[in-house]
Image (cartoon, grey):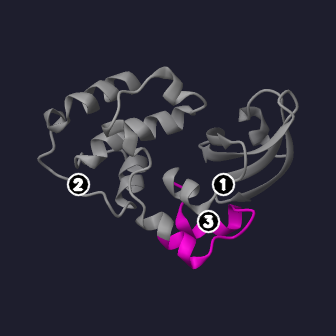
Amino acid sequence: MADFVSVLPEGDELLSHSEAENYALALVHDAEEETDGTALVRKDGEEWVLLSRVGGTFLAEDLHRLGVPLKLWNRLLVEPASEGEREDAINSGPGWPFTEEMALEESDLAGLTPWERMLMASEILARRGCPFDESPLREYFESRVWYEPDPDFDESDLSDLERSNLAFLR
């Protein structure tokens, strides 16, 4: 049993897992809900961080949205991604496009991990070209085909709705 089990939601029983270069994809059983699901975790220093927890299995698009490097996808996925699935994932748009279309409410964030909330907030900025100084975010958004950093970016470029959603997420 790996030491990342301590980051899984309480009550999850580890059924199996696969690890690849500081990432692990774990099949877990929730005894309370009597369901199986999957959890994606990443090693951050000496600690494991829960990136996402889903009721089923992860697809290539999910791994891309959460920032898992392409070279690790087939080592983590239960069923390896086909070339078409990889290409579709890489060419997909932002992971949370609704943040520019509707005001967020608590129910929209139900079940999201802190990592997913942080990516959602950062994506609002990235769509307008915010250049990121922090290495993980810079690397994450530079791997997106839609991202174009703008050295003249200013938060005033955001719409009122985007500013409101960003404040809500922060």
The residue singled out by tag 2 in the image is 149
- Which secondary structure lies at badge 3? helix
The amino acid type of the residue labelled 3 equals Leu
Magenta part of the chain: 67-87
Residue 58: numbered disc = 1
Q: Residue at x 34, y 28 (%)?
A: 165
Secondary structure state at the residue bearing disc 1: loop
How crowded is the residue under tag 2: few (<14 C-alpha within 10 Å), some, or many (20+)? some
Residue 170 showing in the rendered view: no
Disc 1 or 2, which lies upstream in sequence? 1
Q: Residue at x 35, y 64 (%)?
A: 145
Mark closer to the chain start, 3 or 1: 1
Residue 72, label in figure: 3
Q: x%, y% of residue 43?
A: 63, 46
Q: Residue at x 32, y 23 (%)?
A: 167
Q: Is tag 3's residue or tag 2's residue first in the polypeptide sequence?
A: 3
Please state the horizontal and vertical placement of residue 21, each as a whole percent of the image. 64, 59
Q: Which is closer to the viewer, label 3 or label 1?
A: 1
Residue 51, visible in the rendered structure: yes
Q: Residue furthest left?
A: 152
Q: Quadrant of the C terminus?
A: top left
Residue 18: quadrant of the picture: bottom right
